[in-house]
Image (tube, rainbow, N blue to C red):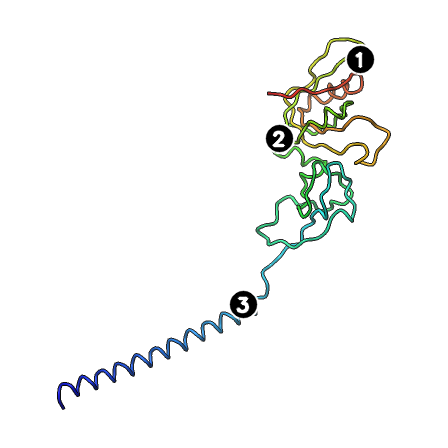
Amino acid sequence: MSVRDRLAVVRRTLRRTLLARRRLLAALLTAVAVAAGLHATAAGPPPRVTVTVAARDLPSGTVLSAGDVRRAEFAPDSAPEGLAAEPVGGTLAAPLRAGEPVTDVRLVGPALTDGYPGLVAVPVRLPDAGTAALLRVGDRIDLVSADPEGGPAAVVAESVPVLALPGTPDEAGATSLTGRLVVVGTAPGDVARIADASVRTFLTIAFAH
């Protein structure tokens, strides 16, 4: 057999070997794809958790009813912490957008002081609703008492954080009270002084630096 013939035989042998290996590799890849598909089908859909969210945009001060909230499905890693277990009947401490989860810090309650160690939540009614409308949650303010009989004004609490702005009387469903309710965080030792000033004097605010 000539050299040319031997080379031709070698080429044919190599071609058959490569073709067989390609077929084997294709079969293996097909088997892997089928197995992966079967596993995905058997595993089912990814896990989801049910979260209570706002059914529509809600103003602060809203007393939540069943129609104000709905259920939504979230991936476990996207659901926020501190979800309110029973939000219906609670009062919103700040506005809530449609679809936003209802968490404990969104409701008027002890959770409002999370992030403010050593402080307690104190509701204060400011007689001037227009002044209260300038406030935003997170603002730092001084509470100032002004004597309606002409006595000197006095600061009763300094640099207290605004924790919540429950709605106006109309929003909250009350009509017998005037002004605007503001929830602030203060040291326990200041609570009595603030309560006394709110009863005997005209409370207003100054923005703290």
Q: Horizontal and vertical percent for residue 51?
A: 67, 51
Which is nearer the N-term, disc 1 or disc 3?
Answer: 3
Eyeballing the image, is 25 above or below 71? below
Task: Indicate the amino acid at tag 1.
Answer: Pro
Which is nearer the N-term, disc 3 or disc 2?
Answer: 3
Residue furthest bottom as drawn: 1
Residue furthest left as drawn: 2
Marks 3 and 2, how far apart at CA: 46 Å
Screen quadrant of the N terminus = bottom left
Eyeballing the image, is 38 above or below 90? below
Query: Residue tagged by mark 2?
Result: 116
Q: Badge 1 local density, few (<14 within 10 Å), some, or many (20+)? A: few
The residue drawn where x is 21% and y is 83% is 10
Q: Horizontal and vertical percent for residue 96?
A: 69, 41
Query: Residue tagged by mark 1?
Result: 148
* Badge 3 vs badge 2, beta-carbon distance below 8 Å: no
Q: Nearer the viewer, mark 3 or mark 2?
A: 3
Residue furthest top as drawn: 151
For this view, does 112 lie left or right of residue 201?
A: left
Q: Horizontal and vertical percent for residue 173?
A: 83, 36
